[in-house]
Amino acid sequence: MSVAPEPPPAAPPAPSGRADVALRVAGGVVAFWAGALAALLDLIFATWAWEVVKGLHGGPAKAVVGIVLGVGGIAAVVVLTVLLSWFARTAVGTRWAGALAALPWVVVAFAGGVRTTEGDLALSGDNVIGLGMIMAGAITFAVMGFRQIVVPPAVP
C-alpha cells in the first residue's frame, strides 16, 4: 500500500465548439420529441387501462385491476418524466432544458382531452386513470423544473 497520493484522473478532452453545439441541439430535439412521444404513450395506456377497468364486471376483481393499472400507470409516468427531465438537462446542459420535454408533453396530454371534429376523444372526463396520470406527470415536471432551477450547478 502506497502512502503517496494518487494523481487525479486526467480530464477528458474538451469538445470543439461546433461539435458541442451540434450535440446540444440534437439532444434538445430528441428531448422535445421524446416528451411528445411519452405523452402519446401515456394517453394510449390510460385509454386502454380505463377500457379494461370498465369492461370488467363489478366486484373485487374490478377494484383490484383498476388499482393495479392506476398505480402502475402513475408510477410509470413519474419515472418517465423524471428520466425525460434528467436527459434534457444532461443533453442540453442548461437549467431550462427540462422545458424542452415538458412543453410537448403537456400540449399532447391536454390535447387528448379535446374532442376532434369527428367526435373522437382520447381522454374522457370519467377516465380516472388518465386524469391521475396527467396530474402526476404535470406535477413531476413542475417539481423537476423547480429543482433544476433552484439547485446550484455542480462545480467541476
Image (spheres, helix red, strand yellow):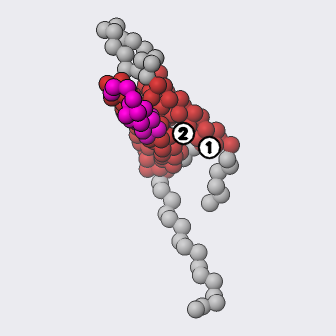
Q: Residues within 10 Å of mark 1 (few under 14, many from 20)?
A: some
Q: Are marks 2 and 1 in contact (CB under 8 Å)?
A: yes
Q: Residue furthest front?
A: 59
Q: Which residue is mark 2?
A: 97
What residue is rendered at 64% in x and 43% in y?
Answer: 147
Can residue 13 be seen at all in this image of the molecule? yes
What residue is rendered at 60% in x and 91% in y?
Answer: 2
Which quadrant does the N terminus fall into? bottom right
User: Is 87 located above or below residue 38 in the figure?
Assistant: below
Which quadrant does the C terminus fall into? bottom right
Q: Which residues are magenta?
A: 56-73
* Residue 86 on the magenta span: no
Residue type pointed to by label 2 = Ala
| Depth check, front residue: 23 or 143 | 143
In the shown orientation, is residue 142 left or right of residue 57? Answer: right
Q: Position of residue 105 (x, y in %)?
A: 46, 30
Can you tell which of label 2 and label 1 is closer to the viewer? Answer: 1
Residue type pointed to by label 1 = Gln
| Depth check, front residue: 85 or 72 | 72
Q: Which residue is mark 1?
A: 148
Q: Residue furthest bottom?
A: 1
Can residue 111 be seen at all in this image of the molecule? no
| CA–CA distance in space, label 2 to label 1 | 9 Å
User: Is 110 located above or below residue 116 in the figure?
Assistant: below
Element type at mark 1: helix
| Quadrant housing residue 31 | top left
